[in-house]
Image (cartoon, rainbow, N blue to C red):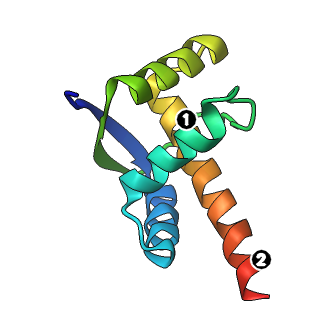
Amino acid sequence: MNDIPLTIRLPSELNLQLATASKFLGLTKTNLLRATIHHDLARDGENLRFTAPVSGKKHRLVFNVNRLTFEILENISARHGQTMNAVIVAVAMLAVELSATWLRSVSE
């Protein structure tokens, strides 16, 4: 399968949180995003929270996805009337939230 490159602009603080979560889990940022997409969005995408665009410094990330992942993102984008970038920012927020919850549960 051919990869489809998506250039994403993440708020710098979110990028740092995503990097920290992925490091603790032993994953790359993009693998953590993919896992969140396939585990939590393939069903319905109702766990996403969209926020107003954040001004300030952004981190650019090239996110290569396969056709299936692209179609999931495309469907969520159309269903919520959001840009692909907004969907992936929401995915990153969800990935950080779920990772933090899981990490807290295993450390107790």
- Tell me the residue at 80%/88% (across/down): 108
Percent position of residue 17, x then y: 52, 65
Q: Dot 2 lies on which element? A: helix
Viewer-proximal residue, 46 or 67?
Answer: 67
Q: Which residue is mark 1?
A: 53
The answer to which image quadrant residue 9 occupies is: top left
Question: On screen, 4 above or below 37?
Answer: above
Viewer-proximal residue, 108 or 90?
Answer: 108
Percent position of residue 62, x then y: 26, 43
In the image, taking residue 107 as reference, residue 86 lies left or right, namely left
Q: Which residue is mark 2?
A: 105
Residue situated furthest front in the rendering: 1
In the image, taking residue 9 as reference, residue 90 lies left or right, namely right
Q: Decide: few, some or many residues near mark 2? Use Cα within 10 Å; few <14, some 14-19, many ≥20.
A: few
- Tell me the residue at 36%/62% (across/down): 28
Q: Decide: few, some or many residues near mark 1? Use Cα within 10 Å; few <14, some 14-19, many ≥20.
A: few
Percent position of residue 38, x then y: 54, 39
- Tell me the residue at 66%/34% (across/down): 50
- Disc 1, disc 2: CB below 8 Å? no
Question: On screen, 95 above or below 46?
Answer: below
- Tell me the residue at 52%/31% (across/down): 86
What number is the disc on residue 79? Answer: none
Q: Earlier in the sequence, mark 1 or mark 2?
A: 1
